[in-house]
Image (cartoon, grey):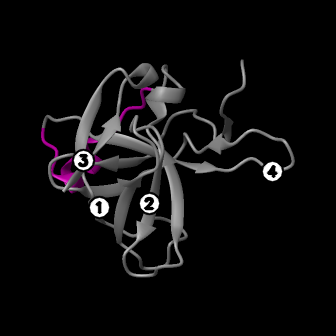
Amino acid sequence: MSVMVAVGPSGSTVRPVPETLEFVAAPPGMMALRRFRLDALDDAGALFALRSTEDAGVRLFVIPPQVYVPEYAPVIDAGTRAALGLADADPVLLVVVHPGEDGAPPTANLLAPVAVNPETGAALQVVLDEEWPLRAPLGVAA
């Protein structure tokens, strides 16, 4: 099965992504967990829960960043592309969201996106060599 992920500004374009993601290397801070299920939390493909299939207590919220930050266009290096088996195809990007607390807006980790091969579900969280914020506020005018 697959889920539809919005990949364009304001959700203008969607791409199917396998429901089960297999990380090439465990995401930082996730112990040795590598297998996750991508569950859509809305009908627009703009909010997901990434749930470990190996530890039911592990869940992250992720979003396709271009929906919320249209100018987000990081360069995914050749090593990451090769590890994901992408060749010339573009990965689908997801970023981890931290819910806001005490009235603060939620924030997104734009520095370390999860790159996903939309054909196979191979995934890898990469730390970019670019200047993107670790905690970019969402829903706040610049």
Give the residue at x 45% y 28%. Answer: 66
The residue identified by callout 2 is: 50
Report whether 57 appears left or right of 12: right
Numbered circle sitting on residue 120: none
Dot 2 crowding, Cα within 10 Å, few <14, some 14–19, many 20+: many
Q: Which residue is mark 1?
A: 21
Secondary structure of residue under mark 4? loop
Q: Label 1 sits on what residue type?
A: Leu
Q: CA distance from mark 1 to mark 2?
A: 9 Å
Q: Count residues near mark 1 (Cα–Cα under 10 Å), then give few for <14, some for 14-19, many for 20+.
A: many
Q: Find numbered disc 1 in the image and state the secondary structure of the residue it sits on.
A: strand
Which mark is first along the chain, 4 or 1?
A: 1
Seen in the picture, residue 69 relative to 49 is either above or below; the reply is above
Which residues lie in the magenta part?
A: 73-87
* Number of callouts: 4
Residue kind at label 3, given as amino acid type: Val
Query: What amino acid type is highlighted by mark number 4?
Result: Glu
Helix, strand or loop at label 3? It is strand
| Mark 3 and mark 1 residues within 8 Å of each other at the beta carbon | yes
Q: Mark 3 or mark 4, which has the lower sequence index?
A: 3
